[in-house]
Image (cartoon, grey):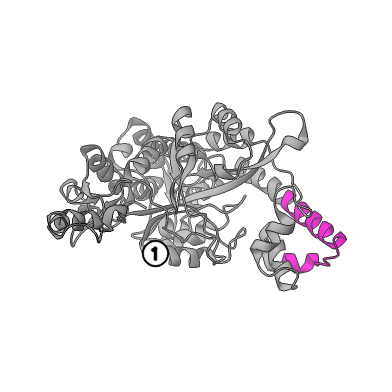
């Protein structure tokens, strides 16, 4: 969360009733100040970071970004975590949530509902990171337009880490991938990779059902598939919900604690790829690779060291209950970004964090964007370059994959490919990022490609 201040309570508030009255009066003002928490003006580093982050957040809402000027940022207070709090009117909070799920994987709500709930909680930037699929991104983007939220297209990839040739030492590792608003480059390569994992999830879920049946818990596969929904690869949570609905457990937590935990009596692995392979693919498709919930790992030190060598960019360090110092230190040792998100699924209960509940320091968000934006800019350039070299429907689809309605039907009609790039880039890149020779060369090539309202490409004869 960037912009939602939070107050640190002081344990020194309690007065000593046996103290002298004069001493109490002397310290009265001082104690009152402590009860207000620790507040201070933003440092120059935080102010510059805040300005840079807000510029990116409000790329497609220029009027909003004007209210987040350099001088406005300077009027914010920060708490001890570097989280900003507006002092008055006109200031707009910037809440980031970089880890969330919808019913496209194992969440309980549709992408639209997740975006709506994020909006209610004040989230300005939401990464939808469903397990092994990006199928919910188009719907999330469409909903985000209505609520004024920025979506980071993401995915949480299920992998396996093998410290040695002994398979019993393998452990599941989840890698978050964050992409530009245009989406991944080499999208077919990524989709094939994810589809293989989803196929393995079907087999894995069937094996879990079989193991439960042998434990005298006659769960039906059809019930699990129905809960997951059409086209959704079932996960453990879908099996757990089937157990709950059949009355074999009292709640989802009990299903995991008794049967479905890693290595549990009904646990099963799928066909997850090696973690290092997934990271390399994320890098090759224009994404940022971040290790999810490292606190769930049996041997985080070895995992993080190996994954850094494979190209890992960052790791989750922040949760709704604060920063975990041991993982923050590990990130420092390996030069990794420090991030975090709610990991929201919509299950409810005290064990789940709400959307927007993680306080991300503005400097951490700035460091993330500082690394991610050049990667995303290069990916966008490569996607447009492929389209300019081969103006086919399939290459057009790669550009409009996550925003066809807004790009092709929003605003004035597009007459040529140059209009397309001029419409897209201001939504995705800053003015500075757009002003380079590569994009100018692409614009020139695209000026000879015509687009009709249906999005079909018609070559224009060179003059």
Quadrant position of residue 53? top left
Residue at image location 79% in from the left, 57% down from the top: 206
* Residue that mark 1 sits on: 121
Residue 160 in picture, x, y percent from top left = 68, 39
Which residue is at 70% across, 48% downward? 262
Q: Left or right? Give the position of 364 relative to 29.
A: right
Q: Is residue 389 left or right of residue 40?
A: right
Whether residue 206 is in magenta: the answer is: yes
**Residue 184 included in the magenta stretch of the image:** no
Question: Tag 1, which secondary structure?
Answer: loop
- Which image quarter is the C terminus in? top left
> What's the magenta region?
200-226
* Residue 282 coordinates in the image, percent (x, y): 55, 38
Q: Residue at x 70, y 52 (%)?
A: 261
Q: Is 232 placed left or right of 365 in the picture?
A: right
> Can you see residue 319?
yes
Residue at 80%, 60% (x, y): give it. 209
Circle 1 Cα neighbour tier, 10 Å, few/some/many (<14 / 14–19 / ≥20):
some
| Chief SS of the magenta region | helix
Q: Does residue 95 lie above or below 306 as drawn?
A: below
């Amino acid at each position: 969360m960037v912009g939602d201040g939070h107050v640190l309570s002081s344990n020194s508030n309690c007065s000593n009733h046996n103290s002298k009255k004069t001493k109490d009066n002397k310290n009265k003002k001082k104690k009152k100040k402590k009860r207000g928490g620790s507040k201070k003006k933003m440092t120059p580093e935080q102010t510059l970071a805040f300005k840079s982050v807000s510029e990116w957040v409000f790329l497609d809402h220029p009027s909003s970004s004007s209210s987040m000027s350099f001088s406005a940022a300077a009027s914010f207070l920060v708490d001890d975590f570097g989280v900003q709090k507006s002092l008055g009117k006109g200031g707009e909070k910037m809440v980031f949530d970089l880890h969330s799920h919808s019913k496209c994987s194992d969440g309980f709500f549709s992408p639209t509902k997740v975006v709506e709930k994020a909006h209610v909680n004040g989230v300005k930037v939401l990464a939808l990171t469903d397990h092994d699929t990006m199928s919910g991104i188009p719907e999330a983007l469409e909903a985000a337009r209505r609520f004024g939220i920025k979506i980071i297209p993401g995915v949480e990839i299920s992998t396996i880490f093998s410290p040695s040739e002994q398979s019993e030492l393998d452990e599941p590792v989840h890698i978050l991938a964050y992409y530009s608003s245009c989406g991944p480059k080499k999208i077919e390569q990524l989709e094939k990779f994810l589809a293989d994992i989803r196929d393995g999830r079907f087999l894995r879920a069937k094996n879990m059902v079989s193991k439960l049946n042998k434990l005298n818990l006659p769960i039906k596969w059809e019930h699990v598939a129905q809960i997951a929904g059409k086209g959704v690869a079932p996960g453990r949570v879908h099996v757990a919900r089937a157990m709950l609905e059949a009355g074999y457990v009292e709640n989802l937590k009990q299903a995991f604690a008794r049967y479905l935990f890693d290595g549990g009596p009904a646990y099963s692995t799928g066909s997850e790829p090696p973690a290092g392979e997934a990271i390399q693919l994320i890098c090759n498709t224009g994404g940022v690779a971040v290790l999810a919930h490292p606190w769930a790992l049996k041997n985080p030190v070895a995992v993080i060291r190996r994954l850094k060598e494979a190209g890992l960019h960052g790791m989750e360090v922040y949760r709704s209950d604060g920063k975990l110092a041991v993982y923050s230190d590990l990130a420092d040792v390996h030069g990794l970004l420090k991030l975090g998100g709610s990991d929201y699924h919509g299950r409810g209960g005290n064990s789940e964090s709400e959307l927007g509940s993680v306080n991300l320091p503005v400097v951490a968000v700035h460091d993330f964007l500082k690394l991610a934006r050049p990667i995303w800019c290069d990916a966008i350039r490569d996607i447009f370059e492929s389209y300019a070299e081969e103006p086919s429907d399939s290459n057009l689809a790669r550009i409009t994959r996550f925003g066809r309605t807004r790009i092709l039907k929003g605003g004035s009609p597009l007459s040529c490919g140059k209009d397309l790039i001029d419409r897209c880039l201001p939504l995705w890149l800053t003015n500075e990022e757009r002003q380079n020779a590569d994009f100018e060369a692409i614009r020139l090539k695209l000026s000879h490609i015509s687009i009709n309202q249906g999005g079909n490409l018609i070559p224009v004869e060179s003059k």
